Image (cartoon, rainbow, N blue to C red):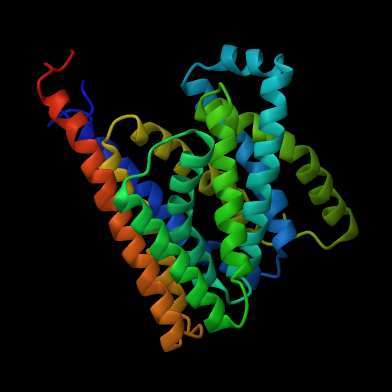
């Protein structure tokens, strides 16, 4: 069925995208609960890489992509790109887990507001994608927001920029890899799990590990797998079935949830810091409007095509 066809796959796909971003939005609370149980960011990250493997493997089996996985494992170029993407996503996860357990949820929200605008700039610089006036306006507003945030916090918002650049870099690398989301995720998790398993075993041997120490701790560590793999697969499935304009609006659900969590938990929110978010929100709105305008011709074309049964 065509992408924008009414009554077809668009409604389930829209629901999948919403669920995906809502999961990403509440993940700060998950990591904070684990932190309060005594787990360090390194232990959470290691377990996240380990327990994401069974979930990623399950999705590969359901998608019948075993052959694609074996082909990717035999391709040195694909493995090299996926090794790089695994380093980038591990860095992103590690920074994020540390930040949300260090009272910096607002900084993570800022980073993920910046990310799609950074992606727009990267698309123009690396993939020769065109940026219209609205795109330049969105990027300009985002840059202004970062500058105001730097003034507000007395220096560059390092956490926000690190999250934006690591995840943006991850997206760029994955765009160059000839592998589906499920296949790429499984291989990335397998690579990271080599180090994750070693660290978890060392923690358990030294008595510092929390796996098996109590039922709540064990359950939360095991939950790292679904919380990692499920939203990524939902996003991959939805992205192929709903218009870009829908995703452009929905992708701001995650950082908005983070923003609400940060404010509700009493993080410092000065007038100057509020002004920086106003600029970032302005850039986000302009970005979404620009994406909607770009998608209109494609949507008009799909309406002329009969749905394929």
Location of residue 58 by image quarter: top right
| Residue 108, image x, y percentages | 53, 65
| Residue 240, image x, y percentages | 34, 29
| Residue 63, image x, y percentages | 46, 21
Q: Depth check: 305 or 123 in front?
A: 123
| Residue 222, image x, y percentages | 61, 49
Q: Depth check: 66 or 105 in front?
A: 105
Residue 206 drawn above or below residue 295: below
Location of residue 9 by image quarter: top left
- Quadrant occupied by the C terminus: top left
Q: Depth check: 221 or 27 in front?
A: 27
Which residue is located at x 47 percent, y 59 percent?
114
Residue 270 visible to an observer of this rendering: yes
292 with respect to 150 (left or right): left
- Quadrant occupied by the N terminus: top left
Which residue is located at x 45 percent, y 54 percent?
24
Q: Which residue extends farthest right? A: 206
Q: How many marks overall? A: 0
166 with respect to 304 (left or right): right
Residue 4 drawn above or below residue 120: above
Residue 58 visible to an observer of this rendering: no
237 with respect to 206 (left or right): left
Which residue is located at x 49 percent, y 16 percent?
64
Q: Which residue extends farthest front? A: 133
Location of residue 238 by image quarter: top left
Which residue is located at x 51 percent, y 25 percent?
180
């Amino acid at each position: 069925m065509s992408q924008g066809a009414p009554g077809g796959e668009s409604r389930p796909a829209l629901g999948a995208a919403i669920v995906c971003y809502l999961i990403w939005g509440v993940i700060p609370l998950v990591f904070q609960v684990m932190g309060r149980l005594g787990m360090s960011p390194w232990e959470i990250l290691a377990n996240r890489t380990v327990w994401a493997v069974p979930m990623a493997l399950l999705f590969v089996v359901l998608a019948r992509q075993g052959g694609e996985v074996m082909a990717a494992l035999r391709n040195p170029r694909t493995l090299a790109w996926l090794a790089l993407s695994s380093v980038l996503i591990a860095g992103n996860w590690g920074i994020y887990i540390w930040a949300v357990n260090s009272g910096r949820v607002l900084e993570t929200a800022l980073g993920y507001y910046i990310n799609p605008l950074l992606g727009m700039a990267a698309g123009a610089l690396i993939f020769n994608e065109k940026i219209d006036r609205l795109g330049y306006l969105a990027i300009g507003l985002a840059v202004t927001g970062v500058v105001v945030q730097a003034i507000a916090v007395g220096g560059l918002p390092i956490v926000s920029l690190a999250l934006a650049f690591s995840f943006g870099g991850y997206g760029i690398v994955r765009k160059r890899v000839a592998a589906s989301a499920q296949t790429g995720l499984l291989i990335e998790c397998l690579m990271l799990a080599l180090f994750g398993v070693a660290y978890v075993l060392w923690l358990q041997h030294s008595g510092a590990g929390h796996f098996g120490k109590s039922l709540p701790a064990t359950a939360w560590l095991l939950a790292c797998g679904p919380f990692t793999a499920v939203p990524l697969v939902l996003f991959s499935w939805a992205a192929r079935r709903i218009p870009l304009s829908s995703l452009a609006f929905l992708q701001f659900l995650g950082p908005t949830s983070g923003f609400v969590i940060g404010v509700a938990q009493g993080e410092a929110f000065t007038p100057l810091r509020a002004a920086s978010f106003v600029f970032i929100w302005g850039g986000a709105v302009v970005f979404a409007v620009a994406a909607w305008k770009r998608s209109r011709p494609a949507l008009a074309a799909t309406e002329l095509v009969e749905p394929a049964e």
